[in-house]
Image (spheres, rainbow, N blue to C red):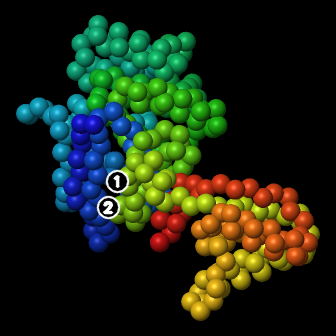
Amino acid sequence: MTELLEVKGLTKSFGLMQAVNGINLSIAEGSCVALLGPNGAGKTTTIRMLTGLLKPTAGSIIFQHLKKGEDPKTLLGYLPQSPAFHPWMSGYEYMVYAGELCGLRGSEAKKRAKELMERVGLGNAAKRRIGGYSGGMKQRLGLAQALVHRPKLLILDEPVSALDPIGRREVLHLLQELKKETSVLFSTHVLHDAEELCDDVVIISKGSIALQGSLASIRHEHRKPMIELSFEADPKSLAWSEAFRRRVNLLREDASMQLPPIETVEKHGDELRIIVNNIDAARQFLLEEMTKERLKINKLSIGHSSLEDLFMKVVGQ
């Protein structure tokens, strides 16, 4: 794939606080990249530098297809986390206005406005005032204005974080379609959205990249087999699960002890999540333990650790 954007050593300081610390990343044409990180990790600061809204303290941002003297903003479509609109304008009026600001002539701006309002599902609301739009409708209008000049890269800052479940689903469905037509970079702390939409992942923590790569390669390299257990809420089972968690974690701290085929045990409510290094041996080990103790099992399921598990491990370091 042809490279569209390359970032080297991107850094931003505010006085003594370093919000972004030497980020290196690249975005290929036709790719969808998720910028992941907890609140305060530096996602929005990074995006504001990429869009030219914030000047970097150091580093470079290189757009490969930029013509001599051309403004990088002509290649970008941007949707901020909380887009602001003139509430007294209709959606259609706003889109014409946005098109003209991007250099489209009157007739072309009107044609593009009508086309995009239909595309994002707002055709029937085009003449309504934006002040009466729902949150999901405003996000879709924001996407339409970001696309009005046919950008090569669409940059979205937390595009669904403030939406209700219906609005969130509407916007995610639209993004699924849009990523077939243009490159997309979006920031989020919702791991499920990243898994659903993206090809590549960049996880940042405390202003630095903690992990990056294709979603497929990260899954292959980092995911581990996992067993999930839950018990009936009787005192004996609950006591055993807590004692088992402590016992396994203590064994791992003692190099002289023979370890079971288990790496870590985490307790989430009434459920144990057990990362193992040999699924068959671990299953046999656990069944023998639970049979011996005559525990009342509600569920035993086998799977793999998720992107969320890896995210929590990385940002917690």
Nearest the viewer among 309 and 277 is: 277
Dot 1: few (<14), some (14–19), or many (≥20) neighbours within 10 Å?
some
Q: Position of residue 149 (x, y in %)?
A: 29, 23
Disc 1 marks which amino acid? Thr
Q: CA distance from mark 2 to mark 1?
A: 7 Å
Q: Which residue is mark 2?
A: 20
Nearest the viewer among 238 and 185 is: 238
| For residue 241, side relative to residue 45 (left or right) | right
Q: Position of residue 179 (x, y in %)?
A: 41, 31
Report the residue at 53% width, 40% height from top.
Answer: 196
Q: Which residue is mark 1?
A: 45
Helix, strand or loop at disc 1? Answer: helix
Report the residue at 74% width, 56% height from top.
Answer: 301
| For residue 36, side relative to residue 58 (left or right) | right
Q: Is residue 316 above or below residue 101?
A: below
Dot 2: few (<14), some (14–19), or many (≥20) neighbours within 10 Å?
many
Q: Position of residue 100 (x, y in %)?
A: 27, 19
Q: Is residue 76 above or below residue 144?
A: below
Which sits earlier in the primary sequence, circle 2 or circle 1?
2
Nearest the viewer among 216 and 256 is: 256
Q: Is label 2 in contact with label 1 (beta carbons under 8 Å)?
A: yes
Report the residue at 31% width, 67% height from top.
Answer: 18
Disc 2 marks which amino acid? Val
| For residue 128, side relative to residue 259 (left or right) | left
Helix, strand or loop at disc 2? Answer: strand
